[in-house]
């Protein structure tokens, strides 16, 4: 159905505002702390480095505080959260090493709050603002909930701190707020613009009641709220001590120089690279249950001197479904790749890095959607696909330079294989959880080495996969296996890291079974592309086996090691699906690896043989894709390999009777 405009929604369609514009809007409503350029220039190098590293450690302490107080496995075991320190107008000075995709728009939310809340209800010491509105920022979809807090020093707003984490359920039609049948935002969790939920250091119970009432797991969401409050409190305590020791002016000068340093160093790096343009297209298959459409995100990256222009012109219009993302999600697809691929040796001060970037995007597209588009899956849909095209273009740019090419990486795990369980746990309590097994995706290949097998996700440097035992302890489920899968990494001269699979069944729930929500694209076409002749990672797939003989096999002392060992009917699940699992049903989910780099026919045959022995590549894949002939003991037959590779090259060229040198 066509998008029906919602009058008034434009107020929340937030775009980044400059510090000058922000100060003009705030006016006399609030005193904002600042320092002049002379103070910044007067910093001695030792003081600068000591304070800058202290700011970095504070974001790490925020992360530790959040993890220790949260009760959600998504946070405590999988690190699906992040934290940041921002200056007085919201520009990010330091972002944590957790899920950088979540933190990419914290500046937008803090800045919007400063502009829209400074007069009424006002911003004061001890206040904290909660937001899960993807159009305002602070997260990519409604389950990404941020809590940001102004820090006042001597009566002036000195800076902001922010913590953001994925919440497992905030209402909506389906458990987990993952409404796979939805067509617009009204099927999903309610977007909440910034609201003062902590005032003068005390939680406002009226606002908290409104916030928690929507959730299927309100006590867990309440605990995560307190974890974020604790993270901000820890940061404020450390920052006050820093200001008392060195002076607020000196600390602010370090913040300014950190952002300036990040900008100048990135510009210097860009000037070393040749100018040019690189293009990429990423796809998503299926926007909601029953949909079989293919939707594209188009990027043309232009490097001109010391600037990067990300032009998404040509991207498909927003669609009915849950896969769209807002402008905050668009930024969330760009900044994590810039940080990890370009800024490994540069301070992660996004406030300075953004100065080197221009974004061109048409409003009303799937990665810059207007209200009320469905955005419930934004973080792992259009924002993730934006990350894929950004990865491919930036890697192509780096590949033009003999030194900088060492920092590139192919696309990592091109999509998230989402599975959500809900129901009554083994203790008789209601539960909802996102299964984070696919956090162990395969990393993309590099220009001189293979990708790391089940190494994680590039935008989440500190991402983790929960222990099998922790998932089984926390939820009514029992694993048959969780293991790496052969041929899941993209073939290439350097192979993409392999992905993996999980296979489990409901176990020990008083209801006998659990509810399952599946949202996993990348089944109709591969999404983790390779580079420079490297091939994409394999597609993912999910299988549901109904009415198996698993109980009888357990009784006989056997644990199945493959789907073929299980009886019952077999359903290959579509991209989006919602159903119930009974006690004899078994669910299998297989997620992606990373893309390869270079022509697989150039891979060292000995390395291919080693991959076969290690079950990273199948014998069939070794022969058909890599052109490597192995004997019964998996030793390489070099002469036969040379002959086969020559034949494969002739086949590629469409030549049957002309020898093409190996």
Image: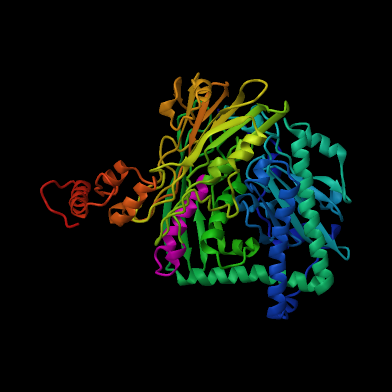
- Whether 206 is among the magenta residues is no
Residues in magenta, as a range: 385-407
**Vertical placement of residue 53 versus 335, above or below:** below
- Residue 372 at x, y percent in the picture: 63, 35
- Residue 222 at x, y percent in the picture: 78, 39
| Rendered-image quadrant of the N terminus | top right
Camera-side residue of 268 and 608: 608
**Vertical placement of residue 178 versus 627, above or below:** above
Quadrant housing residue 343:
bottom right
- Residue 297 at x, y percent in the picture: 48, 45
Colour scheme employed for the rendering of this structure: rainbow
Camera-side residue of 103 and 33: 103
Say whether residue 433 is visible: yes
Camera-side residue of 556 and 414: 556
From the image, give the main secondary structure of the stretch colored magenta: helix
| Rendered-image quadrant of the C terminus | bottom left
């Amino acid at each position: 159905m066509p998008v029906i405009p919602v009058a008034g929604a434009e107020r929340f369609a937030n775009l980044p505002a400059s510090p000058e514009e922000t100060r003009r809007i705030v006016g006399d409503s609030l005193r904002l702390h600042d320092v002049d350029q002379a103070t910044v220039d007067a910093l001695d190098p030792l003081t600068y480095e000591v304070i800058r590293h202290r700011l970095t450690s504070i974001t790490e302490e925020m992360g530790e505080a959040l993890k220790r107080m949260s009760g959600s496995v998504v946070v405590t075991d999988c690190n699906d959260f992040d934290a940041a320190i921002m200056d007085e107008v919201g520009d990010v000075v330091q972002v944590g090493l957790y899920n950088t995709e979540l933190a990419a728009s914290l500046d937008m939310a803090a800045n919007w709050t400063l502009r829209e809340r400074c007069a009424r209800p006002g911003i004061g010491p001890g206040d904290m603002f909660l937001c899960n509105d993807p159009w305002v920022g602070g997260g990519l979809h409604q389950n990404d909930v941020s809590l940001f807090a102004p820090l006042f020093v001597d009566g002036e707003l000195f800076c902001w701190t922010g913590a953001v984490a994925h919440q497992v359920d905030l209402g909506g039609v389906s458990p987990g707020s993952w409404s796979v049948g939805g067509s617009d935002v009204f099927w999903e969790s309610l977007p909440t613009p910034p609201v003062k939920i902590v005032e003068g250091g005390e939680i406002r119970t009226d606002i908290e009641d409104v916030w928690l009432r929507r959730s299927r797991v309100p006590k867990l969401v309440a605990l995560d709220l307190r974890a974020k409050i604790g993270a901000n409190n820890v940061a404020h305590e450390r920052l006050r001590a820093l200001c008392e020791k060195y002076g607020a002016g000196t600390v602010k000068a370090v913040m300014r120089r950190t952002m300036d340093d990040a900008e100048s160093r990135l510009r210097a790096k860009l000037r070393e690279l040749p100018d040019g343009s690189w293009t990429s297209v990423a796809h998503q298959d299926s926007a909601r249950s029953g949909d079989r459409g293919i939707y594209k995100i188009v990027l043309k990256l232009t490097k001109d001197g010391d600037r990067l222009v990300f032009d998404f012109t040509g991207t498909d219009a927003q669609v009915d479904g849950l896969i769209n993302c807002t402008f905050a999600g668009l930024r969330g697809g760009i900044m994590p790749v810039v940080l990890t691929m370009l800024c490994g040796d540069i301070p992660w001060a996004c406030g300075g890095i953004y100065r080197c970037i221009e974004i061109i995007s048409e409003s009303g597209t799937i990665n810059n959607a207007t209200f009320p588009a469905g955005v419930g899956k934004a973080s792992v849909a259009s924002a993730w696909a934006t990350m894929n095209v950004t990865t491919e273009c930036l890697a192509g740019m780096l590949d033009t330079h003999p030194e900088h090419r060492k920092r590139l990486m192919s696309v990592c795990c091109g999509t998230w294989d989402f599975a959500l369980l809900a129901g009554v746990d083994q203790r008789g309590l209601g539960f909802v959880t996102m299964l984070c097994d696919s956090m162990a995706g395969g990393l993309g290949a590099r220009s001189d080495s293979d990708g790391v097998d089940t190494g994680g996700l590039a935008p989440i440097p500190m991402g983790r996969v929960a222990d099998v035992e922790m998932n089984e302890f926390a939820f009514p489920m029992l694993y048959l296996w969780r293991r790496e899968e052969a041929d899941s990494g993209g073939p290439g001269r350097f192979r993409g890291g392999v992905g993996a699979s999980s296979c489990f069944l409901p176990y020990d729930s008083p209801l006998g079974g659990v509810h399952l929500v599946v949202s996993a694209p990348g089944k109709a076409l591969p999404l983790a592309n390779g580079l420079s002749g490297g091939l994409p990672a394999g597609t993912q797939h999910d299988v549901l086996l109904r009415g198996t003989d698993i109980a009888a096999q357990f009784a006989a002392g056997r644990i199945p090691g493959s789907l073929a060992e299980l009886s019952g009917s077999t359903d290959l699940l579509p991209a989006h699906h919602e159903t119930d699992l009974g006690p004899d049903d078994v669910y299998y989910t297989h997620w992606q690896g990373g893309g390869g780099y270079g022509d697989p026919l150039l891979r060292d045959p000995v390395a291919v043989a080693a991959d076969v022995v290690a079950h990273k590549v199948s014998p069939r894949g070794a022969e058909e894709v890599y052109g490597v002939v192995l004997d019964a003991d998996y030793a390489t037959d070099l002469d036969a390999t040379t002959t086969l590779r020559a034949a494969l090259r002739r086949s590629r060229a469409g030549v049957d009777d002309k020898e093409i040198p190996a």
